[in-house]
Amino acid sequence: MTTGRISARELLAEHQRIIAEHNGPLNALPTLCLARAEEEADRLDKTLAAQRAGRKATGVGPLAGMAYCAKDMFDSEGVRTTYGSPIFANRIPEKDAEIVRRIRQAGALLIGKSNTPEFAAGSQTFNKVFGATRNPWSTGRTCGGSTGGGAVALATNMVMLADGSDLAASLRNPASFCSVTGLRPSSHLEPRLQTGLNPFNTLSMVGPMARTIADLRECFLAIFDPEGCAPNRTLQAWVELRDAQARQRAAIAAGKNTKHLRLGWAPDWGGLPVQQEVAAQMQACADQLSAKGITLVTGFPKLPDVRQAFLTLRGQFFVAEFGELYAHHRAELKDTVIWNIEQGMRITAPEIARAEKIRALARTRIEEYMQEHQLDALAGPTNQVLPFDLETPYITNINGIELDTYIDWLASNFIFTVAGMPALSLPAGFAKESATGALLPLGLQLVGRWADDMALMDTAERIESILSLSATPC
C-alpha cells in the first residue's frame, strides 16, 4: 500500500474472498462488519494517495489497512457482541471496548467478531448462539479456546491480526492448536483494558494474536503503547521506522558480542502429564534448537499448591464477573460457567489470602530460577495434548492419569497465569497422532521475566527463525 501497487480496498477484498471460502465451514467469524470496513478502506486509500503525492493529508497508524477481528467478548460499536451467551445474543454495543478502540485507532480494519465459548469459559470454542468453531488443520477437531475463532481466522488468512484474553490459556492454547502465535502479557494493572466488571483484576489479561512474532509485536504495541502508535505519520514513515527497528534487532542478535540464547527446558513443566506425541515433537524442537547453538538447561522450579491457588482465584473471578447473572439467569448459563461460579461461592477469605501468597511466591521462584541459571526464557509445550475431537468438551485423561476438573489439562498454561509472567505460544511443527496418523499442530511455550514482554518477543523472534514452518492448513 505504501507504493500504491495494491490498495487498502483491494487487500480487504482478498480477505473477503478468503472469508467467503473458509468461514462457513470453519465458523471462525460468525459476525461480520465488512461494509463498514470497506468504507474505512476507501477513506484510507484517499489518505494514502494524498501522502504519496506529497499533498497535505492526515497521518495514519502503523496498522493501517490490516484486517483485524475482535473477540466476541469485547464490545464493538454498532457490531453485534454476544459473549457467546444466549442472554446477550442480540446485544449491539454503543462504543468500542478500550482494546478494540486502540487497535482500530492504530489503523486496523475491524472486519468481524471471532467466536468464543460462553463468557470465554473453556478451551473448546463452542456456544449455543453460533455453534462450534473447527480446527483448520483437521476440521473434525477443536481449535482450542477461548480465543478459538481468532486463531482460526489467522491460520486461514481471513485476518492479519486478532485480539483476545487469557485467564487460564485462552490466547496460548488456540495459538498452539492452530499453529499461530499468541501472547499472554505480564499481569499488570491497567483498568481501562479490563473489559469485565472488575477493572482491577489482573488474573485475566488481554493480548494479541498473529501469524508471526513481527505482527504480534505490532498488535502488542497498539494495545499497550497507544500513544506510540497514534495515527500521526505517513505509512511510508511507519514502514521505515519498523524496518529500522527490525534491522537493529537482527544486528544485535547476529553481533559478535551477543551471547547465545539460554533456555530453561521444561518438557513436562515439572511433572505434568504430557501426551506421548507432544513429548516427541518437543524433543525434536530441542534437537533443532541445540543444533543452532542454543543452550538448553533442563529443569523447572517447584511451585507447590499453584493449582489450588489458580482454582481459588479463578472462582473468585467468576463470582465477581458473573455472580449477578447466576442469580437471575442460572438456567441459561453453561454448566461449566455455573461450576466456576459455585466453586467461587464456597471460597473463604483465608483461602483467597493464601492463594494470593502462593501467586507471589510462584513469581518469585520462577524469576529466581531464571536469574540463577542466566536464562533468557523458559520453554516447553504450550498444551499437554494435541487437538482433540470436536465432540469432546474437554480432556479428562492424559496418559492414563485421570484429571480432577475440566481445566486441569490446561495446567501447562495456567501455572504462568498464577505467576503473572509473560508467556507466548509459538508454532513448533506437527506431531503424528499414533491412533489416526493425522499430522496435528502444536506450540512451543516461551515464558519470560515479569514486565519484560518485549525481551520475550525478541527471544521468540530468534527461535521462530529456527523453527520456521512451510506447511499450510487444509
Image (tube, grey):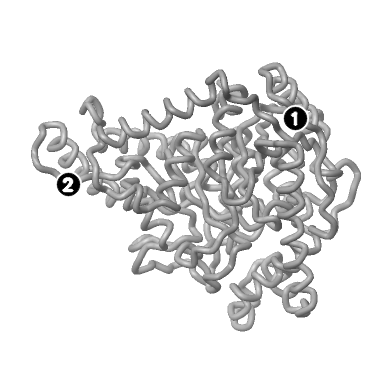
User: To which quarter of the image does residue 15 belong?
Assistant: top left
Give the residue pinned by disc 2.
58
Q: CA distance from mark 2 to mark 1?
A: 48 Å
Q: Which residue sits furthest left?
A: 55
From the viewer's perspective, tell me whether residue 293 is left or right of residue 81.
right
Q: Residue at x 74, y 25 (%)?
A: 286
Q: Which residue sits furthest right?
A: 400
Q: Count neighbours of disc 1 (C-alpha within 10 A) and say few if under 14, some if 14 to 19, many if 20 or more.
A: many
Residue at disc 1, secondary structure: helix
Q: How many marks?
A: 2
**Which comes before the other along the chain, label 2 or label 1?**
2
Residue type at tag 2 = Thr
Compare residues 307 and 80 and report the one nearer the observer.
Answer: 307
Give the residue pinned by disc 1.
282
Compare residues 34 and 65 and report the one nearer the observer.
Answer: 65
From the viewer's perspective, tell me whether residue 253 is left or right of residue 100.
right
Q: Residue 385 location in percent, x, y?
A: 76, 40
Q: Residue at x 76, y 44 (%)?
A: 369
Q: Which residue sits furthest bottom?
A: 327
Q: Residue at x 81, y 63 (%)?
A: 308
Q: Residue 296 location in percent, x, y?
A: 75, 28
Regarding residue 258, the answer to whether it shows in the image is yes
Position of the C terminus by quadrant: top right
Q: Is residue 439 above or below residue 68?
A: above
Residue type at tag 1 = Met
Q: Residue at x 68, y 31 (%)?
A: 440
Compare residues 27 and 470 and report the one nearer the observer.
Answer: 470
Please tell me whether mark 2 or mark 1 is closer to you in this view. Answer: 2
Q: Residue 38 location in percent, x, y?
A: 26, 45
